[in-house]
Amino acid sequence: MSGSEYVVGRRADAQGEPTGERHAVIAVATRKEPPFRAECGAKVDVLDGNWPPAGGEEHACPVCSRDTSAPWA
């Protein structure tokens, strides 16, 4: 699958803001209610942009990176 078929999924903090590692979630899976199932199997609560994530300091989940061929080591 290409990166365009994924969105970023993350857990939410007490204020409902995205937090923690970014996970690849197949975009069509987000048409239902959270929690969303990530490529690595993690359940995430909120969506936070497109895949792969932008920003060099906050990398994605290593498993999701591998599964989606994203450029994160």
Image (cartoon, rainbow, N blue to C red):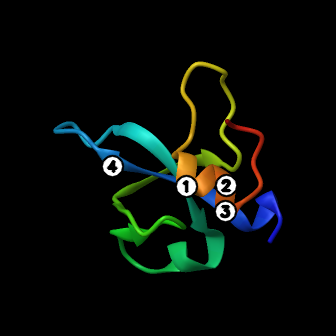
Q: Mark number for residue 11? A: 4
**Three-letter amino acid code at disc 2?**
Arg
Which quadrant: the C terminus?
A: top right
Q: Are marks 3 and 4 in contact (CB under 8 Å)?
A: no
How would you rate the neighbour count of disc 4 (Cα within 10 Å): few for under 14, some for 14-19, many for 20 or more? many
Image location of residue 15, percent across then percent down:
21, 36
**Three-letter amino acid code at disc 3?**
Asp
Real-space CA distance between mark 3 and mark 1, rounded to the nearest whole angstrom: 6 Å
Asked if residue 42 can be seen in this view, the reply is yes
Residue drawn at point x = 77 percent, y = 40 percent = 71
Q: Which residue is mark 1?
A: 63
Image location of residue 62, percent across then percent down:
55, 46
Labels 4, 2: front one: 2
Labels 3, 4: front one: 3
Dot 2: element:
helix
Q: Are marks 2 and 1 in contact (CB under 8 Å)?
A: yes
Q: In which image quadrant can residue 6 be found?
A: bottom right
Asked if residue 8 can be seen in this view, the reply is no
Q: In which image quadrant can residue 26 be found?
A: bottom right
Task: State the residue lying farthest toward the left.
Answer: 14
Dot 1: element:
helix
Side (left or right) of 23 relative to 13: right
Q: Are marks 3 and 1 in contact (CB under 8 Å)?
A: yes
Q: Mark number for residue 67? A: 3
Real-space CA distance between mark 3 and mark 2, rounded to the nearest whole angstrom: 4 Å
Dot 4: element:
strand
As rendered, which of 71 and 52 lies closer to the eye?
71
Residue drawn at point x = 69 percent, y = 50 percent = 51
